[in-house]
């Protein structure tokens, strides 16, 4: 069919929808012509004009019916009928503004909950990389073990090997993380940045907003092209959106770099949740990350990704990269420990590493499941309200059937009204999602990196909300529509409303029981997560987080060499030590409870561990700490001594180990004076510290070794200051102390140790907050549903109640009867809800710190809460029924 033909059919259909349109008039004229011809024929046979017209009408039939019949044979009829149904539905909804407002509000709450979670998941997991062209062909490249038990990042030689030999990918790019201090002439800016290969932007298909990206010659020789590209946001905030900034010299970690380009607005590289403010060439890595062994075949520090050639699928590319990896291993140029990583995994480039993507997807799925339960409760409420409204409209339906409307026509009309309500609710839900995601984007998170999330709804969220509204509108509107259309015309015209009440009551009761069961499931889930959060807060980390301020200091990013860094840290310590209220000051390489750790293998010399293959090494976790560290965090040294200032580079290397390490290999006291080998150097154990929590609250206590700051490189350390007052009171004094030593440094972020360690409970806090809010919402909706069904039952039984009271029943008897009815439904809902909760709680095990998924207290408390709210929802209509006048009740119905 040609475009012209399609357009002709479409325009004809549109014209047919408009009453009095040319198409409709042509049809009317044609039918009138047939009538006129029949009339003339009868006049010719001798009939009068009036008799001839009546005879012609008998021959031709009703013109309206004939016209509708012709319309029904055309495809336009479907659209025309739909438009008519929508118009009629809107008129009916406007006639009941209170009912429409309430039902749309309920739907908005349900769809808003689901849409908010989906919008957040969409912003983190599903949105394509901003600025990238044809993102579907971009793939992340992970080098893994064959069983995918783990993997490693790429070395620069390995990356270059793949880039030069691949044929299935049009390009392979690499990037690494860096923290830079950018000085634009005013003050320093500490930013998160990427060190990238020269083809980084071209593989992504990104175009600069200003200037240019890196040239091929800037990706060849190390340390020859100090150039930098900044983000659009940094260009606006730090450079005043000055177009003449291209070519300007910017200080990068103390070195002079030339600004050559500005990235497009919103571009954040390939790790989108982190605000990336700058990109420098891979060839300048040794300048901005001096400790990086750039050319080493053992230094795996790069993430790699590529763009598939058109027509090439991921499996073909994976097989090629796997073969290339096998060829490189066969050349014997890689260390033995990397040879086992001979597998390749290709994943879509989503803005998150694969492991983080999977973890976030699982977390979002749990929250989305909780939100769907709220939507189900809201939808069941709506179904109950639509059923009640259908009873009120039964006389109208009977009249329409008596006038010739078919059952299918009634169902279609009622279903259209239901879908319209859900679509309006979807609009409200999207509005709620916009507000909720706006708040979520502004919740401060206790993490060190500059995080910025874009969770607001986009077109995918709008399509999702529309689909949800259509599906739920049909599913939960179909049953009330079928029930309303299945009626006895005679009884409805007599206004006999008792027919079918028993069945309607059974269905309504089932809906309420379902609401209560889902509500209890929500409450139990929220209760378990709140218990886990409370338990996590009460877990003793075995160190004291109160009254300690911390500040992360990155001397390497300031351009300091090791000697200058040592001088700075020593001077800062002395300056902070003199602040009012400060009792102890120290440094550490890593704050505890950050859900990460540093580990290495050591070789024990005299450990009493029979059967251990010492040549393989003993795995331990490590930290580097300064003198007074154990005093700052209140971890006692149980045996031996703490570190001293004399434990410097000129002294023999020493370490302090934890109890677990000492007991595992020696008696606790027997560990003092023992030695082990780390990084080829012999280390003597001088002290044993009490066990503590190091990475997470649920970890099995590992063997832990503390090394002395004075005996290693001092580049990136975290200042820790204990005070007799509030840790927050040290924010300004610590910043002032840092800037007093070097005005060109970026002001450090000072946070309390209590806030810093709260990061470990972030998943529980988010899950408890979301499920708690949704649980309360579900309970509210379920209680409204119970209240509605009890109120409706009381109104339908008003005559029965009047008879009972006339025969001597007391108000307390009526009260008890109504409440008993509500509590019977509640009991069934609680039983079903408990069974569902017992099954579903297994899905929350990963988030339950020290809490049994079948925690009896949580199940009992949430059940009691539901029963109490349900009792209140039953008590109010019961009280009204008991206070009714028997004479009025007997005259009702």
Image (tube, rainbow, N blue to C red):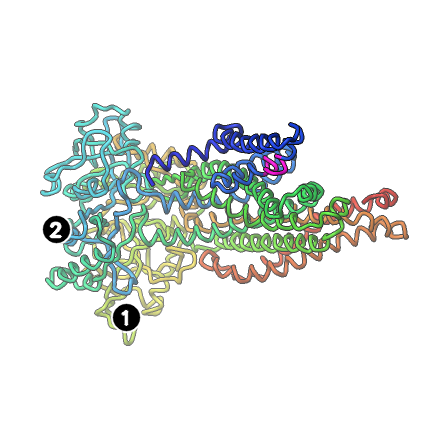
Which secondary structure, mark 1?
A: loop
- Residue 248: x percent and y percent? 18, 27
Depth check: give the residue in front, 717 or 158.
158
Work out whether 562 lies above or below 736.
Answer: below
Magenta region, residue range: 56-65
Task: Assess whether residue 85 is covered by the magenta stretch.
Answer: no
In this picture, residue 531 sits left or right of residue 819: left
Nearest-to-viewer mark from 1 and 2: 2
Characterize the magenta stretch by its predominant secondary structure. Answer: helix
Front one among 552 and 94: 94
Residue that numbered label 2 is attached to: 164
Q: Is residue 230 visible?
A: yes
- Reading the image, the residue beneath label 1 is 607
Q: Nearer the viewer, residue 94 or 693?
A: 94
Residue at image position (65%, 43%) is: 404
Residue placed furthest toward the bottom: 611
Please indicate whether residue 648 sits to the left or right of residue 110 in the image.
left
The stretch drawn in magenta includes residue 61: yes
Dot 1 or dot 2, earlier in sequence: 2
Q: Quadrant of residue 401?
A: top right
Circle 2 sits in a helix, a strand or a loop, which is it?
helix
Q: Indicate whether 326 appears above or below 488.
A: below
């Amino acid at each position: 069919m040609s475009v012209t033909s399609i357009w002709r059919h479409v325009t004809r259909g549109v014209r047919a929808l408009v009453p009095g349109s040319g198409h409709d008039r042509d049809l009317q004229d044609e039918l009138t012509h047939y009538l006129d011809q029949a009339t003339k024929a009868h006049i010719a046979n001798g009939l009068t004009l009036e008799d001839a017209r009546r005879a012609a009408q008998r021959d031709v039939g009703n013109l309206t019916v004939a016209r509708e019949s012709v319309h029904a044979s055309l495809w336009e009829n479907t659209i025309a009928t739909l438009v008519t149904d929508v118009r009629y539905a809107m008129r009916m909804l406007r006639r009941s503004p209170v009912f429409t407002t309430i039902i749309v509000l309920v739907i908005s709450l349900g769809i808003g909950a689901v849409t908010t979670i989906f919008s957040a998941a969409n912003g983190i997991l599903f949105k394509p990389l901003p600025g990238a062209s044809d993102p579907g062909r971009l793939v992340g490249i992970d080098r893994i073990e064959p069983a995918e038990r783990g993997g490693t990042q790429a070395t620069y030689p390995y990356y270059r090997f793949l880039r030069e030999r691949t044929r299935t990918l049009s390009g392979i790019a690499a990037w690494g993380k860096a923290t830079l201090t950018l000085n634009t002439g005013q003050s320093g800016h500490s930013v998160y940045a990427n060190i990238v290969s020269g083809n980084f932007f071209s593989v992504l298909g990104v175009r600069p907003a200003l200037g240019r990206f890196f040239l091929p010659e800037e990706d060849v020789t190390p340390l020859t092209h100090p150039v930098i590209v900044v983000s659009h946001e940094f260009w606006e905030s730090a450079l005043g959106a000055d177009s003449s900034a291209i070519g300007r010299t910017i200080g990068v970690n103390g070195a002079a770099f030339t600004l050559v380009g500005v990235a497009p607005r919103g571009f954040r590289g390939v790790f989108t949740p982190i605000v990336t403010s700058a990109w420098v060439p891979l060839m300048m890595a040794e300048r901005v990350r001096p400790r990086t062994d750039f050319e080493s075949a053992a230094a795996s520090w790069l993430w790699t990704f590529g763009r598939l050639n058109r027509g090439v699928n991921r499996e073909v590319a994976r097989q090629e990269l796997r073969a290339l990896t096998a060829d490189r291993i066969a050349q014997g140029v890689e260390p033995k420990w990397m040879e086992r990583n001979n597998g390749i995994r290709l994943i879509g480039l989503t803005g998150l590493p694969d492991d983080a993507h999977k973890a976030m997807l699982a977390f979002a799925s749990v929250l989305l499941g909780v939100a769907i339960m709220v939507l189900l409760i809201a939808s069941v409420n709506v179904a109950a309200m639509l059923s009640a409204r259908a009873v009120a409209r039964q006389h109208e339906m009977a009249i329409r059937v008596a006038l010739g409307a078919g059952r299918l026509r009634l169902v279609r009309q009622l279903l259209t009204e239901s879908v319209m309500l859900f679509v309006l609710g979807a609009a409200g839900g999207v509005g709620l999602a916009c507000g909720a995601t706006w708040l979520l984007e502004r919740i401060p998170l206790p993490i060190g990196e500059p995080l910025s999330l874009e969770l607001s709804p986009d077109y995918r969220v709008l399509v999702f909300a529309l689909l949800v509204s259509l599906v739920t509108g049909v599913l939960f509107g179909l049953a009330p529509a079928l029930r309303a259309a299945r009626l006895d015309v005679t009884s409805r015209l007599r206004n006999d409303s008792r027919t079918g009440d028993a069945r309607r009551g059974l269905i309504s009761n089932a809906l309420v029981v379902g609401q209560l069961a889902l509500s209890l499931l929500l409450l139990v889930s929220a209760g378990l997560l709140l218990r886990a959060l409370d338990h996590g807060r009460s877990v003793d980390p075995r160190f004291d987080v109160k009254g300690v301020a911390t500040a992360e200091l990155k001397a390497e990013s300031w351009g300091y060499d090791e000697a200058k860094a040592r001088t700075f840290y020593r001077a800062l310590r002395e300056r902070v030590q003199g602040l009012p209220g400060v009792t102890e000051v120290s440094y550490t390489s890593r704050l505890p409870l950050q859900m990460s750790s540093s580990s290495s293998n050591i070789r024990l010399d005299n450990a009493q561990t029979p059967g251990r293959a010492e040549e393989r090494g003993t795995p331990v976790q490590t930290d580097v700490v300064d003198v007074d560290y154990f005093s700052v965090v209140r971890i006692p040294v149980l045996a031996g001594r703490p570190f001293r200032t004399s434990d410097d580079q000129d002294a023999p290397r020493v370490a302090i180990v934890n109890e677990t390490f000492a007991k595992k290999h020696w008696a606790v006291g027997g560990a003092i004076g023992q030695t082990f080998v780390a990084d080829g150097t012999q280390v003597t154990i001088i002290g044993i510290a009490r066990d503590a929590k190091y990475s997470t609250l649920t970890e099995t206590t590992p063997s832990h070794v503390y090394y002395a700051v004075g005996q290693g490189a001092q580049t990136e350390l975290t200042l820790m200051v204990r005070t007799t007052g509030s840790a927050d009171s040290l924010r300004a004094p610590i910043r002032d102390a840092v800037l007093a030593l070097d005005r060109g440094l970026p002001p450090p972020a000072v946070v309390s140790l209590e806030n810093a360690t709260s990061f470990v409970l972030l998943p529980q806090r988010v899950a408890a907050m979301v499920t708690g809010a949704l649980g309360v919402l579900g309970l509210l909706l379920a209680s409204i549903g119970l209240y509605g069904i009890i109120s409706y039952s009381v109104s339908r039984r008003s005559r029965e109640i009047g008879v009972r009271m006339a025969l001597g029943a007391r108000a307390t008897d009526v009260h008890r009867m109504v409440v008993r009815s509500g509590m019977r439904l509640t009991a069934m809902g609680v039983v079903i809800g408990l069974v569902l909760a017992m099954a579903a709680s297994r899905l929350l095990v990963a988030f339950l710190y020290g809490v049994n998924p079948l925690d009896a207290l949580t199940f009992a408390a949430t059940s009691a809460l539901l029963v109490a709210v349900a009792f209140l929802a039953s008590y109010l209509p019961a009280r009204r029924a008991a206070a009714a006048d028997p004479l009025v009740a007997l005259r009702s119905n």
